[in-house]
Amino acid sequence: MPKNDKKALTLLDPAEYNNAYELFADLAMDHLFAAAVLNNDLDGAIYVDNVKRPQSGFMSTKELQFLAGNPDNPAFNAGLKQVWQETIFMGHAPGATLEAIDLVFTGDSWQHQLKALFGDWRWPPIPNHARHYCLTGAGLEWQTLVPEGYVVQQLAPLLLVGQPDGQIPFILDFRQRKVKGGL
């Protein structure tokens, strides 16, 4: 799809991903795949409604797909449905063949648009709410479960120095960009 600020849906060039940082910021803080695509450390595709000032966006990776921004954007949603027909509904994602679509968005923000976007394709979706756990009190003494000779440490930039390619270095890059004003 040609690049044009006035089109309803534009595929960004990886050099333009920084234009979508703010749009995907919340998702990138919780999902390393999104952060890695924004950093150009993982193959992905980002579609937005406006190259310079995106208000609605879709990101696709080999693992997850993300919706961000304004869900009530009829022109973007019509273009998105067409892109989905040509890509993820056919099992195509950057660097992978999809067997399922794992679509992520913040809260219920896009929930009311899913039926229109998916149409009759494998409808209805199976919701899967992300969960995390915080151990804040007495109970599980996890320190006793750490094997002898191992140490559990908080993830810090100094621990990432010297990690081999393909490990966790993109986390450091993403957080450095945030500190430098990226997010």
Image (cartoon, helix red, strand yellow):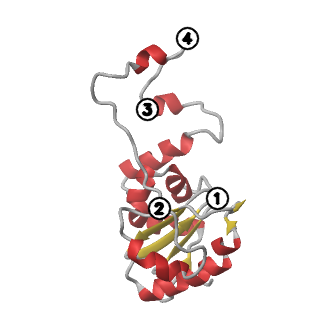
Q: CA distance from mark 1 to mark 4?
A: 36 Å
Residue picked out by circle 2: 127
On screen, 141 above or below 78? above
Which element type, helix, strand or loop, lies under badge 1?
Answer: loop
Circles 1 and 3: CB atoms closer than 8 Å: no
What label sits on residue 177 in the rendered view?
none
Q: Nearer the viewer, residue 101 or 164?
A: 101
Q: Nearer the viewer's eye, disc 2 or disc 1?
A: 2
Q: Nearer the viewer's eye, disc 4 or disc 3?
A: 4
Residue picked out by circle 4: 149
Answer left or right for 56 relative to 63: left
What label sits on residue 156 in the rendered view?
3
Q: CA distance from mark 1 to mark 3?
A: 27 Å
Position in image of residue 61 (x %, y %): 60, 61
Q: Quadrant of the N terminus?
A: bottom right
Position in image of residue 172 (x %, y %): 48, 42
Which element type, helix, strand or loop, lies under badge 2?
Answer: loop
